[in-house]
């Protein structure tokens, strides 16, 4: 109840007040701020993935503008020497309006990154988008085998099957590269695990399957039991450190992040930024009010 009240009140608070709290977790309102913060992370030995905030657009003109913004992000970040890659949400490029237009825009962004020998991660959104986003990834990976990856969500009951179905696009030279996360969207129990223990169990099953197939998992979690489980799997399969990475969100659990780095594991931080930060924050809380409690805890405990 308290979480729902907070989530409903937040959109009506002054943006300046909300920014005082959000700036811990958003890397800036513009590209220059995001690049500066990404470089600070690089100086600590941390890789980054830059993400322009925004999704679920209503016109194809917006999709075109978003594509142009991403092309500029790549150009400027490469010029600045940022050590990192890029993440994008297909709905930001019009996936729910015209999937062919969205594919064309995303292909252009991936092609741009590929000219720098770099990489674009396709974020996974809610379940109505899952098949379309896997289709996008499969199609792009054929043309850009080393330059595109996808996100999978461990709480979806279909995920292990999706992994098995990707074996045909997986090679030792260009492995399937997937960020494994728990999943944030509210989904029905018929398609998603709800218990904490079940989600953790399948998260580790996904990682184990990827290690068995010599795929490349990006292990995206702040959950200590999952991290410790991943350590055990890395040891069990004797996985070299260049064949996987851990990922975390900007501003979250910095001490835990440091401990993973100190153990010799590769770390990448998801760096969200942009003028749509307010809509992003309020929309996320509306989708999942439980996040309000997590955010408040993080604010008062500083990560």
Image: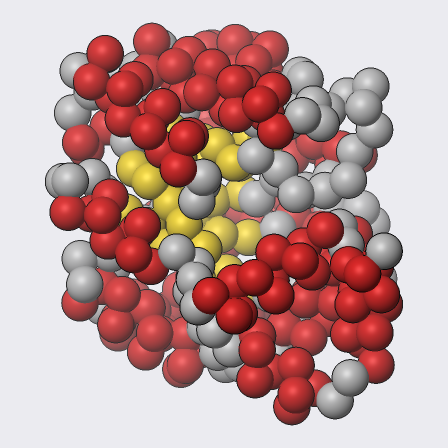
Residue 92 appears left or right of 230: right
In-image side of 229 versus 121 (left or right): left
- Viewer-proximal residue, 70 or 44? 44
Residue at image coords 20%, 39%: 265
Is residue 6 left or right of 299 when viewed as pictured? right
In which quadrant of the rendered view does residue 208 lie?
top left
The colouring scheme, among rainbow, by chain, secondary structure or one colour, is secondary structure
The residue lying at 78 percent from left, 84 percent from top is 13
Position in image of residue 299 (x %, y %): 53, 69
Quarter of the image for the N terminus: give it.
bottom right
Height in image: 237 above or below 142? above
Q: Quadrant of residue 284?
A: bottom right
Identity of the residue drawn at 39% across and 56% down: 253
Q: Residue at x 19, y 33 (%)?
A: 242
Res 174 visible? no
Q: Is residue 205 above or below residue 203?
A: above
Horizontal and vertical percent position of residue 249: 45, 55
Q: Where residue 126 sits: x, y (%)?
A: 73, 39
Q: Is residue 119 visible?
A: yes
Q: Quadrant of residue 36?
A: bottom left
Check the image and report above or below for 33 versus 70. Answer: below
Which quadrant is home to the C terminus? bottom left
As drawn, is 35 to the left or to the right of 40? Answer: right
In-front residue for pair 293/169: 293
Residue 196: horizontal and vertical position, in percent? 61, 29
Say which of 75 and 181 sits in front.
181
Number of numbered discs present? Answer: 0
């Amino acid at each position: 109840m308290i979480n729902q009240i907070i989530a409903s009140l937040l959109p009506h608070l002054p943006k300046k007040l909300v920014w005082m709290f959000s700036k811990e977790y958003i890397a800036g309102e513009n590209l220059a701020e995001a690049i500066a913060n990404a470089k600070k992370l690089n100086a600590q030995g941390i890789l980054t993935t830059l993400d322009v905030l925004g999704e679920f657009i209503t016109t194809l003109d917006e999709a075109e503008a978003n594509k142009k913004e991403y092309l500029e992000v790549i150009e400027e970040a490469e010029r600045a020497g940022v050590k990192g890659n890029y993440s994008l949400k297909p709905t930001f490029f019009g996936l729910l309006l015209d999937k062919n237009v969205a594919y064309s825009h995303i292909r252009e962004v991936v092609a741009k990154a590929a000219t720098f020998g770099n990489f674009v991660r396709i974020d996974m959104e809610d379940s109505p988008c899952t098949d379309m986003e896997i289709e996008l990834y499969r199609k792009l990976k054929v043309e850009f085998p080393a330059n595109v990856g996808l996100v999978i969500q461990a709480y979806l009951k279909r995920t292990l099957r999706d992994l098995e179905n990707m074996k045909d696009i997986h090679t030792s030279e260009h492995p399937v590269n997937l960020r494994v996360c728990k999943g944030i969207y509210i989904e029905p129990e018929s398609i998603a695990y709800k218990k904490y223990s079940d989600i953790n169990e399948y998260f580790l099953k996904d990682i184990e399957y990827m290690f068995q197939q010599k795929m490349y998992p990006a292990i995206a979690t702040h959950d200590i039991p999952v991290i410790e489980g991943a350590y055990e799997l890395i040891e069990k399969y004797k996985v070299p450190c260049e064949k996987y990475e851990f990922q975390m969100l900007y501003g979250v659990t910095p001490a835990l992040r440091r401990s993973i780095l100190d153990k010799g594991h590769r770390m990448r931080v998801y760096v969200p930024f942009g003028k749509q930060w307010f809509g992003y924050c309020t929309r996320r809380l509306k989708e999942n009010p439980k996040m309000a409690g997590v955010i408040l805890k993080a604010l008062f405990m500083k990560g």
